[in-house]
Amino acid sequence: MPIAAGSTVTLHYTLRADNAEGEIIEVTTPEEPMTFVQEQDQLLPKFMEAIHGKSVGDKVQVFIPSAEAYGDEEESLYVEYPKSTFIVDGELDEDAIEEGEVIPMNTPEGETVYGVVTEVKLNTIVVDFNHPLAGTDLFFEIDIVQVD
């Protein structure tokens, strides 16, 4: 059965940065394949297009430039906060503000967004709210294993 809108698809993939020889970003395992509903779950449109019409056993390679994946990295999404923002119960949460830490923050609308601490300065913390794959071209190697 070919993949169509509404199909439940199970597949394995290897995701690399830039091209077929690029650094491996993510790999599914036989124990944990990826399963989703075609054109109903929120996946990259180019990914969905690449597998549309394919069947069990098909292998697909797809290159998705960063602009069509998670976008280019935006300088405006690097935000500097005073360290006082991270005071919890009267104390600075030192563990939460180490470089590389992923921290939850609330928007003025009350939504939780996640950022990565990129720099700890004397009195401020710089947090990057770009998607972790922003600015990265993606290359998928896909193996379709089930279509319902």
Image (spheres, grey):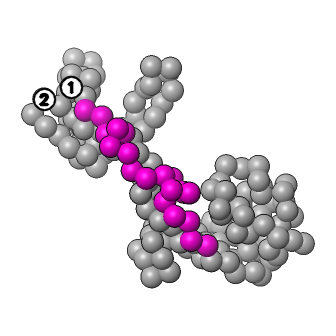
Q: Is residue 116 left or right of residue 71?
A: left
Q: Amino acid at mark 1?
A: Pro
Q: Residues within 10 Å of mark 2 (few under 14, many from 20)?
A: few
Which label belongs to residue 82? 1
Mark pair 1, 2: CA separation:
6 Å
Question: Magenta span covers which residues?
Answer: 62-80
- Viewer-nearest residue: 111 or 17: 17
Q: At x 67% / y 49%, what residue is drawn?
A: 42
Q: Is residue 21 above or below residue 70?
A: below
Classify mark 1: helix, strand or loop. strand
Check contact, mark 1 vs mark 2: CB within 8 A.
yes
Which label belongs to residue 74? none
Task: Measuring from the top left, give residue 26's x and y in whole percent.
Answer: 50, 67
Residue 83 lies within the magenta run: no
Q: At x 65% / y 63%, what residue is drawn?
A: 47
Q: Quadrant of the N terminus?
A: bottom right
Image-quadrant location for residue 143: bottom right
Q: Amino acid at mark 2?
A: Asn
Q: Quadrant of the C terminus?
A: bottom right
Q: Is residue 26 left or right of residue 30?
A: left
Q: At x 50% / y 21%, what residue is drawn?
A: 110
Image-quadrant location for residue 134: bottom left
Residue 65 lies within the magenta run: yes
- Viewer-nearest residue: 16 or 32: 16
Q: Is residue 29 left or right of residue 89?
A: right
Q: Which residue is mark 2?
A: 123
Q: Is residue 10 above or below residue 69?
A: below
- Viewer-nearest residue: 140 or 63: 63
Q: Residues within 10 Å of mark 1 (few under 14, many from 20)?
A: few
The reply to whether residue 26 is in sight is no
Q: At x 73% / y 74%, what residue is drawn?
A: 144
